[in-house]
Image (cartoon, rainbow, N blue to C red):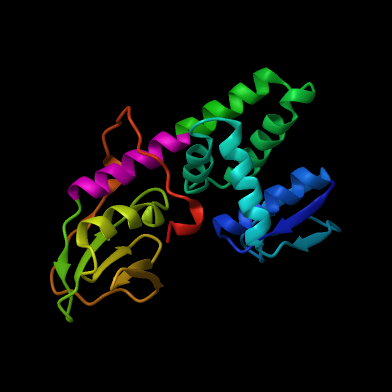
Amino acid sequence: METGTFLIYDGTFEGFLTCAAQILEHDLQISGLSADPGTQNGLFTPTRNIPADRRIAEQLWESLGRKSSGLQRIIYFSFMVEKTQKERVIISYLKQLFNSEEGGDPEKLRELRNQLVAWTARVEWEKRAAESNLRFYPTASDIPCGFIAPEHDILPLLTRHFRLRFGVAPWILFDSRRQYGLRSVDGQVSIIREKPVVKEFHVFDCSQATPEKRFPETPAYRTAV
């Protein structure tokens, strides 16, 4: 039987960072971590809901920025990967990272970082493919809309690129695989759940992206959407 507390967060990156900060600060022993309140957490395992706290999340985010160049991007992009154990792998890495000066396991730290870097690369490939190849189609209200079906949850990562591309003109991006999208009106982006009405369109499968070696700077997590 697993020991420790099973943590539940709201599914946002801010919520995840809040959880991670609590685990690191209080050296919490956890049996699991999930954004799904219905997840089975084992017989007699205590459950704890961790509400997102921007102040706590920002403190950890800034600490990561001071640790090493590019670390924020690795953590943020890894969080977007479609892997069931992503939270636990990231948490394990952060524990090793912040304990490295107190006798952490260098080999384990390197192994975990390599895993996160591999995830980051895959997410980045899909992101770049969408930015370079996505076509937009007019909706019933003449707002251009692009449809994607990525392997990973890259939609929040596309916000900055298409804000720059369209300026204050309206646009919509919709993830057909996860059934949610982003709508920009006057430069303000919001989440939508209803699929836009378009007569003819093509869903771009950006999971077939070609690997690239260079990556751009990661935007601050709190401005990603």
At 78% from the left and 47% from the top, the residue drawn is 30
Is residue 75 placed above or below 190 in the rendered structure? Answer: above
The image position of residue 117, as x and y in percent, is 48, 31
Stretch in magenta:
119-133
The image position of residue 219, as x and y in percent, is 43, 48
Is residue 64 placed above or below 184 in the rendered structure? Answer: above
Residue 162 lies in what quarter of the image?
bottom left
Observer-nearest of 36 and 173:
173
The image position of residue 196, as x and y in percent, is 26, 75
Is residue 172 placed above or below 21 in the rendered structure? Answer: below
For this view, does 42 lie left or right of residue 160?
A: right
Q: Which residue appears farthest toward the top when viewing the image?
A: 107
Query: Magenta residues: mostly which secondary structure?
Result: helix
At 66% from the left and 58% from the top, the residue drawn is 55
Observer-nearest of 213 and 205:
213
Number of dots carrying numbers = 0
Q: Is residue 2 visible from the viewing direction of this image? A: no
Task: State yes or no: residue 61 in magenta.
Answer: no
For this view, does 111 lie left or right of residue 100?
A: left
Observer-nearest of 168 and 132:
168
In the rendered view of the protein, which quadrant contains the C terminus?
bottom left
For this view, does 18 lie left or right of residue 191?
A: right
Residue 185 lies in what quarter of the image?
bottom left
Residue 148 lies in what quarter of the image?
bottom left
Observer-nearest of 208 and 144:
144
Task: State yes or no: residue 121 in magenta.
Answer: yes
Q: Is residue 27 visible from the viewing direction of this image? A: yes
At 46% from the left and 43% from the top, the residue drawn is 77
The image position of residue 22, as x and y in percent, is 75, 51
